[in-house]
Amino acid sequence: MHANLKEIKKAFQAIECEIHEHPSFRFLAILIIFISYIAFSVIKFGGEKGLLVSFLTWSFFVLCTPIADAGVLLDFPIRMVTGLKMVYSEIFVWVVAISLNVYAFAINQGLYDNTLILKVFHTILIEPFPYYTIIILSGIGTFLSVLFGDELIDLSYGHKDERTHHKSHHIKYKIITFIILFIFIFIIYDLLLHHMNINIPLL
């Protein structure tokens, strides 16, 4: 049993290593998850409504989480096709995400009532203070993670020694920065959920 657990741990470590060494794996994983969610939403809410719910949910993860995983759906293929740095294409991603919500507010704010995530998102959008702090901090985290992503892609074509040096040089600063951002965002989300009378045991 203990040996099996070790093998499972090694397998997960190997997968994690591959994802970091080959960013395309991360993109494909996120793409599969997103397509699956679109399919689920379309089945549950119908065609047009399901698509809007899916894309609004995507925009939530773009605007309100401090990692660039949602934006990678556009950033990575743009980088691969055009060579444009993801830090620049992420600006386009944010414009798209904001535009989706402007459109949703214009046609039907009731779309945000379909899922818990969208209800939370709607509250953030209609109460700028203090909840826009989530968007600001998430933006900082997102663009930092995109910068790291660009570096990883650049270094994936370099030498292994260079990648090792890069990791040792940046990893501690990356960890410290993201820990601080996550703590502040967690605190604000905690306040938001209590404000909405949403009780999550971990909070």
Image (tube, rainbow, N blue to C red):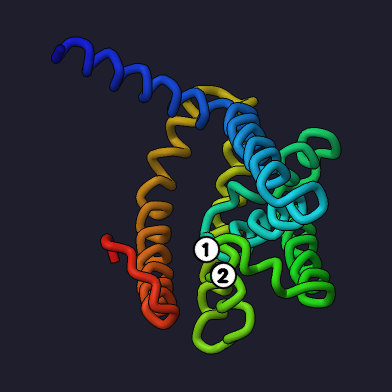
Q: Is residue 193 visible?
A: yes
Identity, as a three-letter code, of the amino acid under mark 2: Lys
42 or 144: nearer the viewer:
42
The residue at the far left in this view is 2
Give the spatial CA distance, label 2 vs label 1.
5 Å
Label 2, secondary structure: give it. helix
Q: Is residue 148 above or below residue 115?
A: above
* Left or right relative to 108: residue 155: left
Quarter of the figure with the C terminus: bottom left
Residue 6 in the image: state x and y as whole percent. 22, 16
Residue 130 in the image: state x and y as whole percent. 50, 86
Q: Which residue is mark 2?
A: 119
Identity, as a three-letter code, of the amino acid under mark 1: Leu
* Left or right relative to 143: residue 195: left
Q: Which residue is mark 1?
A: 116
What residue do we see at 58% from left, 58% from top? Answer: 142
What residue do we see at 64% from left, 34% from top? Answer: 27
Q: Is residue 107 above or below residue 172?
A: below
Residue 100 in the image: state x and y as whole percent. 78, 64
What residue do we see at 41% from left, 74% from top? Answer: 193
Q: Residues within 10 Å of mark 2 (few under 14, many from 20)?
A: some
81 or 113: nearer the viewer:
113
Image quarter for residue 127? bottom right
